[in-house]
Amino acid sequence: MKFSAFALLSIFSVAAAGRPSLTIKVRDGAFAGLDAIDPSISWSDSTKSGEIDLEYGADVGASSTDIASLPKSFWGKASTDVSGWATSVRAEVDAADLTSADVEVEAENGDTSLKLFASAGKAFAVSKVEATQGFDSGDARITVNPRYNVETEEADVVLGYDAGDTNVEVTASADAQSITLSQQIDEDNRVAPTLASSGSVSIEWERSLGDDSSLTTTVTPDESVDLEWKDASWTANINMPISGANIEGANVSIKREVNF
């Protein structure tokens, strides 16, 4: 199969020429066995063919005792300029299903960008399309991002307003609307409340800890408290479902990336 041949070419080419990165994840706070650890090795490399920039890579699992289940996915990306548009096509294949690929097509020209998401196999089917138009208004930057989901026939638009320390994002569809106001309080603290038309409210607080470290807390009343702690190459995520004032458990994910 074409996808299988491409997978082998990508893996062996990158293994020989690229530097692998090792990512180790601990899921759901379950440390009793190896099933809690989900390590994967990612290879990637790039080259150039004429006016086309090529990138390719593969993700390989390292925790399973079943050799056949080790490959997870492989991908390739080609980028070039077409009549002033910076255009790229990226395809990713799940190793468990070599009959199809997820495809992303992007094109950018100045303040305008277009994106198309599709699946390719026996047939080519578009799943989502979106466009983004940006422009300056005084000291602020405004963006308009209409999106359409072909599979569900749902459409919405995201309006963004960026004025340095203050950012506003409005997402609106026929059935629901939400608004997020992000405010940089000082050099180390940012607060971003979100209000949805359904009545739900959440608030995000990001605290810079210095040295590429930060702690982000998101509270959604009667739903969850989420913490993300970034410390250089370490990332820890904690999700705590809540009901009223009661915490009903905790899910923990810890990840570290090591570049050789």
Image (cartoon, helix red, strand yellow):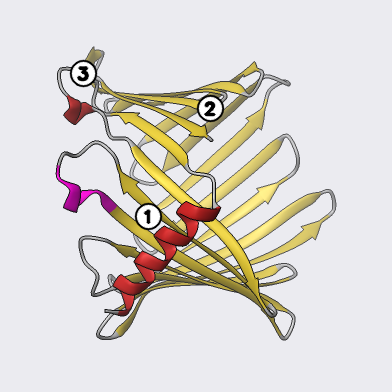
Q: At numbered mark 2, what does the secondary structure look like: helix, strand or loop?
A: loop
Quadrant in which residue 108 is drawn: bottom right
Q: Residue at x 26, y 61 (%)?
A: 95
Number of the front mark, 1 or 2: 2
The region drawn magenta spans 66-71
Residue 93 location, quadrant: bottom left
Dividing the picture into quadrants, the one containing residue 24 is top left
Residue 53 rendering spot, x and y as whole percentages: 63, 70
Separation of marks 1 and 3 at Cα, in angstroms? 40 Å
- Residue type at mark 2: give it: Ser
Cα–Cα gap, marks 1 and 2 = 37 Å
Q: At 57% across and 24% down in the image, what residue appears?
A: 232
If you read the primary sequence from the N terminus, does the residue marked by circle 2 or circle 3 appear first?
3
Q: Amino acid at mark 1?
A: Ala
Nearest the viewer among 65 and 187 is 65
Q: Specify whether 228 is left or right of 153.
A: right
| Residue 28 in sight | yes
**Could you tell me residue 241's position as x and y percent?**
25, 24
How far apart marks 2 and 3 lie (CA) works out to 21 Å
Residue highlighted by disc 1: 176
- Which residue in the structure is indicated by mark 3? 31
Instruction: Assign a secondary structure to mark 3.
Output: loop
Percent of width and height locating residue 228: 45, 25
Name the N-terminal-most of marks 1 and 3.
Answer: 3
User: Which residue was labeled with disc 2?
Assistant: 233
Q: Are marks 2 and 3 in contact (CB under 8 Å)?
A: no
Q: In this rendering, does residue 154 appear at all? A: no
Q: Is residue 38 left or right of residue 115?
A: left
Residue lying farthest right?
Answer: 138
